[in-house]
Structure formats: C-alpha cells, structure tokens
Image (tube, rainbow, N blue to C red):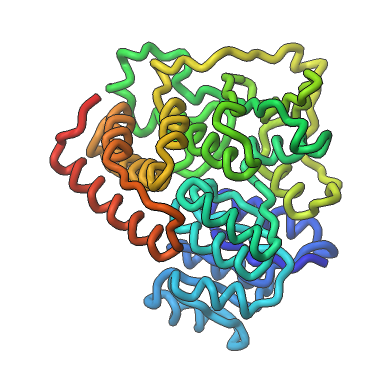
Amino acid sequence: MKQILLFGSTGSIGRNVLDIVAKNPDRFRSELLSCHSNVKLLIEQAKTFKVSAIHLSEQADVEAVRQALPTSTRIFVGNGAFAETIRDIDADLAVNAIVGAAGLEVSYHALAAGKTLALANKESLVAGGELLKQVCRETGAQIIPIDSEHSAIFQCLQAGRRSEVEKIIMTASGGPFRNRPKETFGSITVEEALKHPNWAMGAKITIDSATMMNKCLEVIEAHFLFDVTPEQIDVVIHPESVVHSMVQFCDGSVVAQLSPPDMRLPIAYALQFPRRLATDLPRADFGKLRSLHFEPVDHERSPAIPLAYKVLRMRGLAALTLNAANEIAVAAFLAGKIKLPDIYAVVDKMVIESKAISKPSLPELLEADRQVRKRTEELIASETFSR
C-alpha cells in the first residue's frame, strides 16, 4: 500500500486524488492533507480518510481543527513547516496539488527528502526548474507529472529512449475564445473567461487557459521536466482535448496519448506508476468521435506562447518573473482591476525587467518571487503598462 502526503487536498486536483484513493483503499492511504483556506472541507476530508496529520496555512485555523479532529492528529502550520511535515511523516509519495508558486517549497522539500513527487503544480518547475532538477540529481528522487499534457508526454516517452526523442508536441484546446474576434478581447468578462469548453478547473487555471498562459507555463515545465531544448517543443491547437500530447522519435514515429478529458486518469497513472491502475473512468468511443482536428497556434491571438521561448532564452529569473507576474495579473483581472489582454502586457513588461542570477538557492528564489509580486502590484496600480 502506498502512503501519500497530499498538499492542496481541497482544490480540484486534490479532490480528484482523494476520489482515486477512496476507490482503491487497498492500494492507497492518505497520511496527510493540507489546504490554504478551505478549512471546513479539510476537516471533512480528514474525518473521512482518517489521516494522521494535516497542514494549515494559518495559525488562526488551528483551534477549529483541534476541536473537530482526534487529539492524535498532528497539526503543522505555515510554509516554514513544509520541511518538517515531509520529513517526519512516513510516506512513499508526495502529491503537490497546490496552486501557484506557493507549491515550490513543497516540491523542493519533497525531493530533498528523496520522496517521489507527483506534481500537479506546474509553477514549481517554472519558478525553480534548475534548482529542482539539481536536487533530483543529488537525492535520486523522481518527479511524475500529473498535468494532463505532461503525463501524456511521460507516458509516450516509455516507448523509446530519451536520446531517441526528436521533439515533443503539446496540445492546447485553444480555450473558450479560440474563434472569438481578437478585437473584442478587451470586452471579455470574468464570467466568460471562467467557462472552459472541456475542463472543470479552479479559477486561476481556467483564466490561464483563456489567455493560453497555461500553455506558456507548460512549455517551460516540459523543458525542465524532460530535458529537451526549447526548439524541441511544439504546440498545436486541438479543440477536442482527446490527444493530450505526442512525442516524435528519431525514426519519424509519433506516439500519442489519447483519452476523454478527465484529470483522474493522469492522477491514477501517477499514483500507481510504474504500473497502471484499473479504473471505471470514461473510455474513448472512436465510432462516435469520428474525427480529431489540429491547427497551428496563432501567436497574434495567443502572445503567451512566444513568451515561453523568450524566457527560456533569457534564463536567470525570467521564468520565475513570468510566473509571479502572471499570478498577480490574473488576480487583478478576477478582481475587475484590469482587462484580459492587460495580463499579457503586465507579464511582458515584468519579464523585460527580470534579473539575471546564477544557480539561485531556495531562499533566493522565494525572495525574488516576493519582490516580483510587489513590483507587479505597483505596476498594475500605476496603470503604466501597455502593449
């Protein structure tokens, strides 16, 4: 039986992880659950899964949790407790389902402890890819991706040697505005942007899909995760979200991973790897599907994707800056402070200002992230960004 530490249990990915765990009690046990603010749901989950420990973001939530859970339940509080939490609780696998750059610390400490990391938090590798890969080399820890595209690539790579990979082809649905006239993007409302055609996700990730910033982040993540050059990564639009990604090998063969869009499949693959887990998830019906469509990315309509290649060429803190600025800009859009196209302008301006630093440590990355967020908030408040 695999023992699991689940960080971000109350979010969309976390809830899907627990769905897989609940259906396979003979294979998985969750030892720890964590959340940022949804303490009520965390308590319900902790009772259902009888976990031995929980992690909270705020000290103010401790008393409510103590009153609701058994006295034997260990409680860890704050980002400063991530290392202790991961070190002290015996587990085979750490699942990082935290949203945003806050997940970097979890990824770092899990890998530093030599634990296998099932990673749904793409921002970890975007902000700290070089550091995390170095930790993997030092401890021998492995990262298994949960993102549907990266899980697909990971699965396709089992068909050949890494040295035989010619290129990776990532798919993107195109989001809810794939066919909307570009000149109307400035009038897109928050409600419209939160309606994804294929996937049910949290607010931040859904907005990233609407701007295609999610694909920008995923290109950067793929560069670090699979040790490929930026030139070896292509992106194509695939509206049906059935082909989740492909790998082209040196002999010209292309291996693809296909399935109906359901995050529980890559989650189940990550939890049970290196074997596959029998599930009752929806199956592809090719008789009904009939056709699949692909088209090139229009970079004029989707300026986020060129940003990925730009920051990979710049190196330094460019990728961290892009990620932090995007999180602040998305929050500003959701709050009605800026328009959807302004997200690109804010992020691009911040990336241009990014600093160069060689082999930053975790504290240096966290401080840089804090400074970028502060500067981005100032930029938005000043309204001095433009494209």
Q: Nearer the viewer, residue 329 or 197?
A: 329
On the image, the x and y values in percent for residue 252 come to 78, 18
The quadrant of the picture occupied by the N terminus is bottom right
Q: Position of residue 45 (x, y in %)?
A: 61, 66
- 246 left or right of 297? right
Residue at image location 53% in from the left, 53% down from the top: 11
Front residue of 125/81: it is 125
Point 33% across, 44% down: residue: 325
| Residue lying at the far front of the rendered structure | 358
Q: Is residue 18 above or below residue 279?
A: below
Give x and y (percent) for residue 240.
64, 21
Q: Position of residue 376 (x, y in %)?
A: 25, 45
> Does any portion of residue 211 appear in the rendered image?
no
- Which residue is painted at 18% across and 47% down in the image? 378
Q: How many marks?
A: 0
Res 279 quadrant in image: top right
Which of the 4 image quarters holds residue 315? top left
Q: Is residue 252 above or below residue 46?
A: above
Quadrant of the frame with the C terminus: top left
In this view, the residue in front, 14 or 252, is 252
Q: Residue furthest bottom?
A: 71
Asked which quadrant contains residue 73, the reply is: bottom right
Residue 346 to residue 325: above or below:
above
Q: Is residue 250 left or right of residue 326?
A: right
Q: Is residue 156 left or right of residue 278?
A: left
Residue ID at (76%, 12%)? 290
